[in-house]
């Protein structure tokens, strides 16, 4: 009689190689033979290739003449006639597995009134069942699904099951797990179950912004968070903290100035970048939503989060309301960038990926442990074919179904370059103006250095923008040292690097390598949702300065962002000195910390108008946004000025706008400087107080005084 006691463990680690671990407490860890048995009764003797002594067990590496069929149940019997199940091991991380089970078709569900077909990729499962529940969540008996090619399981339900809840029961290694469909496009409250919806009922007219943007450098990005954007008591928004609230127009603060979306349009930016709005963990959708979260805890990648919906219990509500918001933004001639988080999941062990195909979707280190380059306990293995497919499918779904204009990839350095290039190609086939930007940090994940989508490999990532931390730290000072002062704080240590980042961080000569090949890869910023706001850093670094002079420093930094070559990026409220009261990581802090304070905007209207003027200037003349590095090398020339002044001229640029020559000068010091200009008769467009298209005055004598901590722009 064969006893099933799991006294030992067996793993399929290669397509024809089995690892067996016998504890030393079990017959001294010794067995001279192992037999592989199928459920049907056939068997084969294994060949012991290697035997290794470990601390507490003996490890046997065995080969089999006939490969076990993945998706069938097998058993290992040792010389003592003990029997245990063969578990799926590291084989799922082999090239053979990847290529053998790669599936090119559609996954998820395809709905119609007469028939709904479900498909799930679960090649290591020995059984999969579909679990349905009525709209009021009365469960039906689970239904066995049929295994087809490439490990895809399918079933068709021949009746109308719109609004039914569904999940999959998956059996792997003799263990049943319940999982929500990774391809779900709708979920119930708090995302416990997928929901069958008819997406055709949610579709709106695809309104496109009227103004064409030819190059990524024509874009000006404004980052915000759907809740932060409207939750303030004086936002003037009725449906605060919601998709619909973010789309309300003509809202006003307590002094009557514009707030919300109409203010963003008035400011003049081209793109609103929202922090993640796919379904995430951290806010209880069924409660009063007192919790707060940025959204970097992804649960369901193809579903809008319910906490921003007016009715999270209605699966259609969040979909329709997000689409209404995007349509309204487009009608206002603005565009939407979606912050996407494909680098990790909230909790690996509880994710649908891990429940359905354990061990496949995540990277592991040389010891077989999950890697943690993200710092949150797991790294998505984007280099695997079905992981890459999921990411590409998800991005194109958002583009096709929600008309997203751009994607910002959180911790893009975790993803591999081939995946990012495939995303770029897929989006180009749909709309080659779709923007892609990401955080190209070099993270400690077990991916070959040349395969990481980081700044170092930007040559492999054409037309994909990267957040330029060199710009950020050169202008502001180190993000990770609150007391470090950058160029805008008059630190001459950053003088040379400031000049280079102003020119788009591209090479200006053969001797100068440059950080990027092209300016469309360079996203210039001094603050974002991460870390301290610029104003909070100033309050620490320049505590001895007056409030008004600190505002001059932030005004100068804003000018550097908006007048440098590349893609400018503004954090919402940066133009009116947004503060988080010194909090450097507010990912789950209360509204009083994270909210966009519209009273602060009205208090600082002169500074807001200054930023509006800089934006108008940038948009009016293409010389401030040259689309390629050859043009930057041709037209940008730095002036010989005393440190720490930085001045550059844009020469022979009439083809890009109304002015033929433009001079821009930055002065971070507390004293004024006299500067001799080349030639006479310059129109002053920007000084320490005013920025715009109309000349402030004409400099007739060829001399100009650059005021303390200011930016001057002159043109002729």
Image: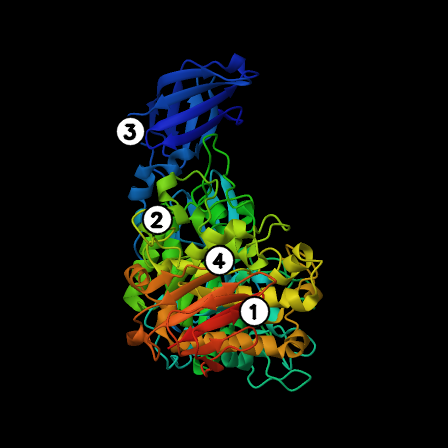
First in sequence: mark 2 vs mark 1: 2
Q: Which mark lies nearer to you, 3 or 1?
A: 1
Mark seen at residue 346: none
Mark seen at residue 707: 1
Q: Residues within 10 Å of mark 3 (few under 14, many from 20)?
A: few
Give the image location of residue 471, x and y in percent.
Answer: 48, 56
Q: Is residue 453 something that shows in the picture? A: no
Local secondary structure at mark 2: loop
Q: Quadrant of residue 501?
A: bottom left
Q: Is residue 254 something that shows in the picture? A: yes
Q: Is residue 455 left or right of residue 253?
A: left
Dot 4 corresponds to which residue? 642
Mark seen at residue 66: 3
Q: Which mark lies nearer to you, 2 or 4?
A: 4
Mark seen at residue 512: 2
First in sequence: mark 1 vs mark 4: 4
Residue at 46% x, 20% y: name it: 59
First in sequence: mark 3 vs mark 1: 3
First in sequence: mark 2 vs mark 4: 2
Cα separation, mark 3 vs mark 2, equals 59 Å
First in sequence: mark 3 vs mark 2: 3
């Amino acid at each position: 009689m064969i006893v099933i006691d799991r006294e030992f463990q067996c793993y399929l680690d290669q397509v024809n190689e089995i690892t067996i671990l016998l504890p030393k407490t079990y017959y001294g860890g010794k067995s001279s033979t192992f037999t592989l048995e199928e459920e049907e009764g056939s068997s084969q003797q294994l060949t012991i290739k290697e035997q290794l002594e470990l601390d507490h067990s003996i490890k046997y590496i065995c080969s089999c003449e006939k490969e076990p069929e993945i998706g069938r149940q097998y058993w290992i019997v040792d010389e003592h006639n003990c029997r245990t199940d063969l578990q799926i091991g590291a084989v799922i991380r082999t090239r053979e597995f990847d290529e053998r089970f790669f599936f090119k078709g559609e996954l998820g569900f395809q709905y119609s009134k007469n028939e709904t077909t479900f498909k799930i990729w679960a090649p290591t499962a020995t059984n999969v069942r579909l679990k349905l529940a009525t709209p009021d969540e009365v469960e039906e008996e689970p239904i066995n699904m049929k295994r087809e090619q490439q490990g895809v399981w399918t079933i068709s339900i021949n009746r109308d099951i719109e609004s039914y809840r569904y999940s999959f029961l998956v059996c792997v290694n003799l263990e049943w797990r319940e999982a929500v469909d990774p391809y779900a496009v709708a979920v119930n409250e708090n995302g416990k179950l997928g929901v069958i919806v008819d997406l055709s009922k949610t579709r709106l007219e695809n309104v496109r912004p009227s103004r064409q943007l030819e190059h990524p450098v024509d874009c000006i990005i404004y980052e915000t968070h759907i809740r932060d954007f409207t939750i303030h008591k004086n936002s003037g928004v009725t449906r605060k903290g919601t998709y619909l609230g973010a789309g309300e127009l003509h809202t006003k603060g307590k002094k009557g100035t514009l707030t919300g979306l109409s203010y963003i349009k008035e400011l003049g930016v081209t793109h609103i970048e929202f922090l993640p709005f796919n379904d995430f963990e951290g806010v209880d959708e069924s409660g009063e939503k007192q919790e707060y979260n940025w959204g970097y805890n992804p649960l369901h990648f193809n579903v809008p989060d319910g906490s921003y919906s007016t009715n999270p219990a209605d699966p259609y509500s969040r979909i329709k309301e997000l689409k209404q918001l995007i349509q309204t933004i487009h009608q206002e001639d603005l565009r939407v960038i979606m912050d996407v988080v494909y680098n990790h999941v909230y909790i690996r062990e509880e994710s649908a990926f891990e429940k359905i195909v354990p061990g496949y979707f995540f990277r592991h280190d040389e010891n077989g442990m999950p890697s943690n380059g993200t710092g949150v306990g797991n790294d998505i293995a984007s280099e695997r074919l079905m992981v890459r497919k999921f990411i590409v499918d998800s991005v194109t779904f958002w583009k096709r179904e929600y008309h997203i204009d751009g994607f910002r990839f959180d911790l893009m350095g975790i993803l591999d370059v081939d995946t990012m290039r495939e995303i770029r190609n897929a989006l180009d086939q749909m709309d080659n103006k779709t923007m892609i930007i990401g955080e190209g940090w070099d993270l400690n994940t077990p991916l070959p250095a040349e395969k990481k989508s980081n700044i170092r490999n930007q040559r492999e990532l054409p037309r994909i923008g990267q957040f330029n931390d060199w710009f950020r730290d050169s202008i502001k000072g180190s993000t990770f040292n609150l007391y470090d002062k950058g160029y805008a704080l008059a630190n001459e240590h950053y003088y040379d690097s400031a000049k280079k980042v102003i020119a788009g961080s591209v090479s200006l000569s053969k001797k100068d390598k440059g950080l990027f090949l092209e300016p469309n890869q360079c996203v210039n910023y001094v603050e974002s949702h991460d870390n301290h706001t610029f104003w909070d850093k100033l309050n620490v670094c320049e505590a001895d300065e007056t409030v008004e002079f600190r505002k001059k420093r932030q005004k100068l930094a804003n000018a550097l962002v908006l007048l440098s070559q590349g893609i400018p990026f503004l954090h919402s409220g940066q133009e009116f000195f947004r503060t988080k009261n010194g909090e450097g990581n507010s990912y789950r802090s209360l509204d009083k910390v994270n909210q966009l304070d519209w009273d602060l905007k009205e208090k600082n209207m002169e500074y807001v108008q200054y930023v509006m003027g800089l934006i108008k200037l940038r948009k009016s003349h293409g010389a401030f946004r040259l689309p390629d590095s050859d043009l930057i090398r041709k037209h940008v020339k730095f002036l010989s000025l005393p440190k720490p002044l930085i001045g550059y001229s844009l020469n022979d640029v009439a083809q890009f706008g109304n002015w033929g020559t433009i001079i821009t000068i930055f002065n971070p010091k507390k004293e004024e400087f006299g500067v001799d200009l080349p030639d006479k008769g310059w129109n002053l467009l920007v000084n320490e107080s005013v920025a715009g298209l109309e000349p402030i005055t004409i400099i007739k004598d060829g001399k100009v005084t650059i005021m303390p901590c200011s930016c001057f722009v002159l043109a002729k």
